[in-house]
Image (cartoon, rainbow, N blue to C red):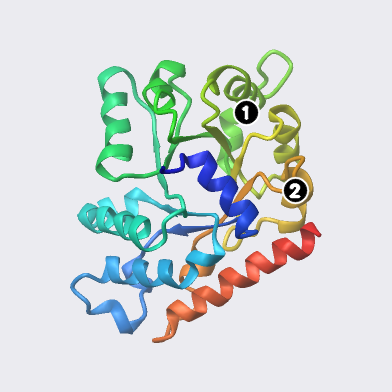
């Protein structure tokens, strides 16, 4: 029987003892010469990274725009299929930040889960619950909702007063208490604002948190673990993209990525323990 997203994620936390999520944001201008001339370079580069790091991660997170902008959606489909086939049990989060209403939301859900076969998808809650409902209805899939994002401009709206609490905490509470009927919800909370991450954790119990901003964005890993871990010493998908993907620029780029991912996993273990 195939595990649903939450089961797969918790199995990776427990059995593989890792909270590392590798973001797959391919940028051909940064590819090593070893793959740059490959006509299938996007797929070849990402597949090599995946195969080098799969045993070290709790999830992979391909970013859809990095493929779609290059007319490489077919490479994304093949990449996710490769992860499922070669590394079963490692869940795939499609980083798409979708959010729309009615039949369009249904199509976006079908795109993420049927076309791309992702195990989870990132979503924007700005349009409200009905825009997210087609995703929530897929009880076996993960619904990862933007809450307090890692970019400085996130505060423009997310920190606005909303009846005595900032909007991002109102979002967190709504997801945890009202939208999570199938137990398939999670939140995006940036590593760059650990105090606010801690406020989210205090309100959502053991709800999983996807935490971008470690690595190139300079998030404080120790503060993230202190503020963000759940009662079981897990609960986080700590995402790093560029710092792992481009750790090396030579023919050994995949091994360099493995070294960077292992260092992050081991640092998380050390700080947690």
Total marks in image: 2
Q: Residue at coordinates 45% horizontally, 50% vertically from top-left? A: 91
Indicate whether 140 appears above or below 190.
above
In terms of depth relative to the viewer, which is nearer, 166 or 88?
Answer: 88
Q: Which image quadrant is residue 80 in?
A: bottom left
Disc number lying in front (2 or 1): 2
Q: Which image quadrant is residue 30 in?
A: bottom left
Q: Residue at coordinates 73% horizontally, 45% vertically from top-left? A: 229
Q: Considering only order in the chain, which callout, 1 or 2, is on the residue closer to the N terminus?
A: 1
Q: Residue at coordinates 69% horizontally, 13% vertically from top-left? A: 163
What residue is disc 2 on? 233
Q: Residue 203, labelled with which disc? A: none
Query: In which quadrant will I find the N terminus?
Result: top left
Q: Residue at coordinates 36% horizontally, 63% vertically from top-left? A: 86
Query: In which quadrant will I find the C terminus?
Result: bottom right
Mark 2 nearby-residue class (10 Å; few <14, some 14–19, many ≥20): some
Mark 2–mark 1 contact, CB under 8 Å?
no
Residue 155 visible in the displayed image: yes
Q: Position of residue 16 (x, y in %)?
A: 60, 60
In terms of depth relative to the viewer, which is nearer, 253 or 217?
Answer: 253
Q: Position of residue 44 (x, y in %)?
A: 29, 71
What residue is disc 1 on? 168
Indicate whether 207 appears above or below 170.
below
Decide if residue 236 is on the left or right side of residue 4: right
Q: CA distance from mark 2 to mark 1?
A: 24 Å
Decide if residue 202 is on the left or right side of residue 216: right
Q: Position of residue 99 (x, y in %)?
A: 38, 28
Q: Helix, strand, or loop for circle 2? A: loop
Residue 211 visible in the displayed image: no
Tell which residue pokes out farthest to the front in this image.
1
Tell which residue pokes out farthest to the top in this image.
163
């Amino acid at each position: 029987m195939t595990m649903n997203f939450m089961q797969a994620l918790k199995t990776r936390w427990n059995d593989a003892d890792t909270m590392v999520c590798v973001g797959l944001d391919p940028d051909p201008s940064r590819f090593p010469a070893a793959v740059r001339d490959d006509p299938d370079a996007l797929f070849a580069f990402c597949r090599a990274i995946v195969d080098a790091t799969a045993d070290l991660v709790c999830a992979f997170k391909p970013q859809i725009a990095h493929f779609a902008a290059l007319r490489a959606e077919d490479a994304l489909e093949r990449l996710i299929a490769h992860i499922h086939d070669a590394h079963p049990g490692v869940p795939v989060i499609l980083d798409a930040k979708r959010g729309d209403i009615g039949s369009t939301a249904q199509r976006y859900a079908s795109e993420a889960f049927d076309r791309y076969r992702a195990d989870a998808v990132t979503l924007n809650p700005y349009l409200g619950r009905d825009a997210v409902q087609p995703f929530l209805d897929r009880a076996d899939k993960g619904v990862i909702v933007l809450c307090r994002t890692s970019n400085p401009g996130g505060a423009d709206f997310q920190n606005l007063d909303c009846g005595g609490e900032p909007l991002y905490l109102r979002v967190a509470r709504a997801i945890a208490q009202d939208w999570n009927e199938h137990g398939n919800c999670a939140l995006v909370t940036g590593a760059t604002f650990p105090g606010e991450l801690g406020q989210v954790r205090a309100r959502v119990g053991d709800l999983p948190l996807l935490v971008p901003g470690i690595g190139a964005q300079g998030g404080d890993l120790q503060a993230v673990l202190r503020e963000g871990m759940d009662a079981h010493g897990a609960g986080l998908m700590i995402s790093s993209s560029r710092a792992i993907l481009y750790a090396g620029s030579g023919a050994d780029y995949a091994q360099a990525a493995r070294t960077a991912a292992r260092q992050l996993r081991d640092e998380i273990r050390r700080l947690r323990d």
